[in-house]
Image (cartoon, rainbow, N blue to C red):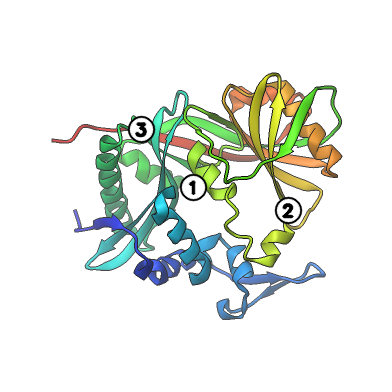
Amino acid sequence: MTSVLVRFATLDDVYYIVRLARQQVMVWQRVSEDGSVLNLPYEDLTVYERWLHGGPWMSIETGSLQLGRLLLGHGLPLVMTHHEKIVGYAETFLGDEPAPFGRNLHIAKLYLPEATPLRFDVLSALVAHLNGYALKKKCERLTLNNPIHNREVATLFEQLGFSEVDTVRRMILSAKTGQVFYKATDYHPDDAINLSNWHLRIGRVASVTARWQAIMPHLWEAMPQYQAQTLHRIRLSVGGHDAYVAIHQHLYNPRSADVTCWTPVLPTSQLVTAIRDWAHRNSYRKLVALVSPSDQKILGLEAESDGYIEQILARGVEQTH
């Protein structure tokens, strides 16, 4: 195997990680106020406009903030090097979840080199490194989400022992008033929450911990445009249980929002009714969430899939000698 080394990322790596991330974007664009789309050079876009093409690693400014937070203990950022050149980057998160995920190390972000022969070597080195780290942390599995249409990445992971343990489908349902008693309060992310063995059955685009760290902390409010795109963080008390819910307004359709929901017990139809009622009272009309087929019944018969599906891939942690 080609010599690929894996190590912790440092702030000196930010420029190279951003350069690697930018390779994933074919065209840089700006959407004007009248809805027209302009193709522009990367340098002509604002930090926020670059963010819209793929998140914090589209700019050095936001990439530095992201890496700084991860290095404070909120995740495990890793770079893969080949002949001392950074050729890959990964963000992983430890978490405890109910079956089938268990105590896991989740790959939430992954940038691989463009060169096809090197991609497998980089991924193989990363998985071997994560396996060793997961052993030390007493994890049962390595996990990741992968869009079902991205067969190239899925094939690479399957060659390294990963297999599908579940799928999530993007479901759309209306916000509407409902007959259910609940209490809703604003949630302040500085509150200490132990997410051990919590569920993320509504909005699972990543593991429980990875998704929490991505959207709950107030990290990106330094961008005024991000602040303008409303993100509600609320605590819902329904049926004797608390749930934490993030409702993230869509950029180009302010009456629609993505929903993510963390629960200590399996979510119920009463919880979904409360979310729909709260959203309707706050002027939303459409809610969108990724949900496993086994949980679709709690959304009700009105929920419809738009055809987008992600696989959840996993591999057991192996003993090394």
**SS label for mark 1:** loop
Nearer the N terminus, badge 1 or badge 3? 3
**SS label for mark 2:** loop
What is the spatial separation of the Cα atoms under label 1 and label 3, in whole angstroms?
22 Å
Asked whether the viewer can see residue 207, the reply is no
Amino acid residing under circle 1: Asn
In the depicted structure, whether residue 41 falls above or below residue 7: below
Query: Residue at the spot x=81%, y=48% of the render?
Result: 255
In the depicted structure, whether residue 289 falls above or below residue 89: above
Identify the residue under disc 2: 230
Identify the residue under disc 1: 150
Q: Position of residue 306 (x, y in %)?
A: 69, 40
Query: Residue at the spot x=50%, y=33% of the render?
Result: 194
Q: Position of residue 179 (x, y in %)?
A: 85, 22
Q: Position of residue 54 (x, y in %)?
A: 55, 60
* Quarter holding residue 212: top right
Identify the residue under disc 3: 141
